[in-house]
Image: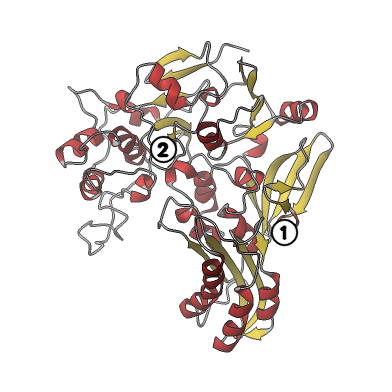
Amino acid sequence: MQSPAVTVNGRSIPLDGTTPHTTALDWLRTQGLVGCKEGCAEGECGACSVLVARPGRTTPTRWTALNACLVPVAALAGQELVTAEGLGTPDALHPVQREMAERGGSQCGYCTPGFVCSMAAEYYRADRAPAAASDGHGGGGPDHLHGPNGFDLHALSGNLCRCTGYRPIRDAAFALGAPEDDDLLAARRSQPPPEVPATRVAADGAEFVRPSGLAEALTLLAERPEALLVAGCTDWGVDVNLRGQRAPLVVAIDQLPELRGFAVTDSAVEIGAALSLSEVEERLAGRLPLLDQVFPQFASRLIRNGATIGGNLGTGSPIGDTTPALLALEATVVLASLDGQREVELADYFTGYRRSVRRADEVIRAVRVPLPPAGLAAFHKVAKRRFDDISSVAIAFALDVRGGVVRRARIGLGGVAATPVRARATEEALTDRPWDADTVREAAAVLAGEGTPLDDHRSSAAYRSAMLGQALHRLFAENPTPSEVGA
């Protein structure tokens, strides 16, 4: 196994002497690349964002923005990074840097390098194209989140600014044209990203291992049940930074080919557990409308570029946003070990707070969602911010309504119990009943009592209960005569 190194701004830098828990952010700053900043150390501010060469769908390589504060640099061994310093120089600004400067998008400058990297990832998105319609808001795009140049402002949803405000940053984003013919980073997209090598980094009594394949990973888990599995590190990175956790053995599974599959049959969609949420969204291409509603509300694009469905389920968190939707979609979890594979209903997967039926020697290989999906689907997330926030309550609905009657109802809830749960009493109260105001009123009263809502710093038990009941009223108000797709 060769000595690990990371290519940064075109220069290969060895990881000699680096500890397994050193974040990419801290490591970059030791290399003198101090444009990358720590603002929150939990993936909420984007001051640390960098570009990573990842496999693309329409081009061999796609420049992907990630939070450097969450990812251990060992997880980037063999890969290719670009920081704000690698985009341009004071004498030759990158187009993104130039637009930010000329349109007043930078004041104190602390957050600016992170904004520039996130903006550059969207600038280099191969399928970004000028919009055809005006939004009526002065942006020239189909809505206020898309510019006339096709720029999607969701790309910046994980970047926070406390000085300049967002109008000049939006102006800079919407003023960007297409990359020039001699743009080296644009040309780089035509070549595949580096192959991610097997990696082992050990220091200070801890070890980081990237196995070469699933078989090696499963063997390691069988031998070392205390091993901690990581994929996008969006949860574990917070534990490292804010709680000082130091696992003795970390096993990275995000690049295992066996966990990155995607398949669609007449009866189901199978989603590889190690695909990032951004990759899942792109591959689904609207096949599961309920998840289409989840993705824009799941943290930020920066987080979705790293976070995985397998990771969301693996942590067992009761407030993971994908879980209520997957419960409503009646998903199953495929678990792999040296003994083989087993498939578990997601509704039976969780056993307690951050606990599940997954054994220490097992890996989540994939999630399966049956087809066709229900005709009426909705995801309601109650949080203090519209984007980049944790749910107080999350409710996912998947209903089949035929002839004005609810023939089948599946409802997933998050944030109302020690685990994500199915609202089975409410499902029963809706099934074989007319889809009308009387049914909804009675079922909403049942839904308000589902789970075991608790008081915490995000909201009170009474508020959570009220939001549960209100969600069904809202669903009916928005869909009094729902489509019978999926019937």
Q: In the drawing, does residue 378 fall left or right of residue 105?
A: right
Compare residues 51 and 441 and report the one nearer the observer: 441
Residue at 38% x, 26% y: name it. 82
Quadrant location of the N terminus?
Answer: top right
Residue 18 image offset from top left, x and y in percent: 52, 15
Q: Which quadrant, please, contains the C terminus?
A: bottom right
Answer above or below: position of 235 versus 281: above
Q: Which residue was labeled with disc 1?
A: 347
- Compare residues 169 and 413 and report the one nearer the observer: 413
Residue most extreme to the left? 102
Q: Is residue 207 above or below residue 475?
A: above
Residue 169 lies in quadrant: top left
Q: Is residue 445 visible?
A: yes
Q: Which amino acid type corresponds to the residue marked 1 in the rendered image?
A: Ala
Q: Residue at x 80, y 46 (%)?
A: 342
Disc 2: which residue: 40
Q: Is residue 98 above or below residue 151?
A: above
Which label lies toward us, 1 or 2? 2
Q: Position of residue 159 (x, y in %)?
A: 35, 43
Q: Identify which amino acid the numbered label 2 is placed on.
A: Cys
> Could one spot residue 329 in this view of the protein?
no
The answer to which of marks 1 and 2 sits earlier in the sequence is: 2
Element under label 1? helix
Q: Please give the label number shown on residue 216.
A: none
